[in-house]
Image: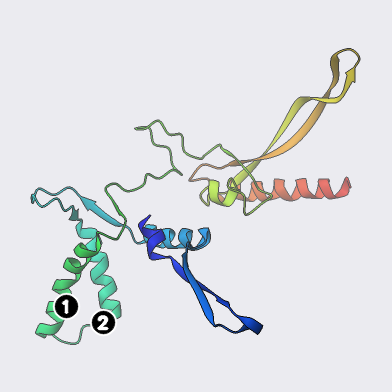
Amino acid sequence: ERMLKELMVEKCKCHGMSGSCEIRTCWHSAPSFRTVGEALKKKFSHAIRVDQSNMGNGMPLVLPEYTRRYDNTLRKIRPHRGNNDKNNRMKRGGPRKHLNRMKTELIYYQKSPNYCERDNDVDFPGTAGRYCNRTSAFAVDNCESLCCGRGYNLRREVKNLKCKCKFKWCCTVECETCRVEEWNAVCMERGRGLKDILLTNYISLRYYNEEYLAR
């Protein structure tokens, strides 16, 4: 709701003869979903990690890693120009200034878990062994994203599926059983050597050649 209010835009329309703007009507319009999404993504990328404090003022405590990141950014923007009081005051005031900005920034308490790797504490298997989509780079389950850059293997699978189904009066559906051969991409485990990667590429190339010759 707050983001929508901040991104509201004013739109106006003119009324009059021959395109003149004798009367102008203006109103506030909500931004597009893309604009809101990009703004939220930017907020998410610069979210502040905090922890509970016992200071009694209700404000969370900014963790040192965030203040260090702020100091490094400050040094890049304003290089050190000597040991004077002005620079020292600027550095000391940096984290305190961001404490006031926490009312408008996104904050979080825990780092996001690594969903690429197995985590036995929460019984999460990771993405190794998951089927992925190797034909579309924009799909949610594309191999580059789902396999976390580890690569994938091609697995030959043979399935018996129902096919050539016909409706028979009355009233049944009769199907034949067809043997279908599929090559499915499966995410590799971390730590696989160069031999496995070369074998994956060889199988992929061989599969594409067979598919091309069969056309």
Residue 90 is labelled as: 1
Dot 1: few (<14), some (14–19), or many (≥20) neighbours within 10 Å? few
Residue 58: x and y in percent read 14, 50
- Could you tell me the amino acid type at mark 1? Met
* Mark 2 lies on residue: 78
Residue 168 is labelled as: none
Task: Give the alpha-carbon distance from disc 1 to disc 2, as whole Å.
Answer: 10 Å
Vertical placement of residue 54 versus 13, above or below: above
From this viewpoint, is residue 195 visible? Answer: no
Q: Quadrant of residue 106?
A: bottom left
* Residue shown at 84% from the left, 50% from the top: 212
In which quadrant will I find the N terminus?
A: bottom left
Residue 110: x and y in percent read 29, 46
* 21 horizontally vs 200: left or right: left
Element type where label 2 sits in the image: loop
Nearer to us in this view, 70 or 182: 70
* Residue shown at 47% from the left, 38% from the top: 126
* 70 horizontally vs 200: left or right: left
Find out whether the residues at labels 1 and 2 contact each other: C-beta distance under 8 Å.
Answer: yes
Element type where label 1 sits in the image: helix
Nearer to us in this view, 132 or 192: 132
* Residue shown at 63% from the left, 54% from the top: 137
- Could you tell me the amino acid type at mark 2? Arg
* 90 horizontally vs 131: left or right: left
* Residue shown at 86% from the left, 21% from the top: 176
Residue 135: x and y in percent read 69, 49
Q: Residue furthest right?
A: 169
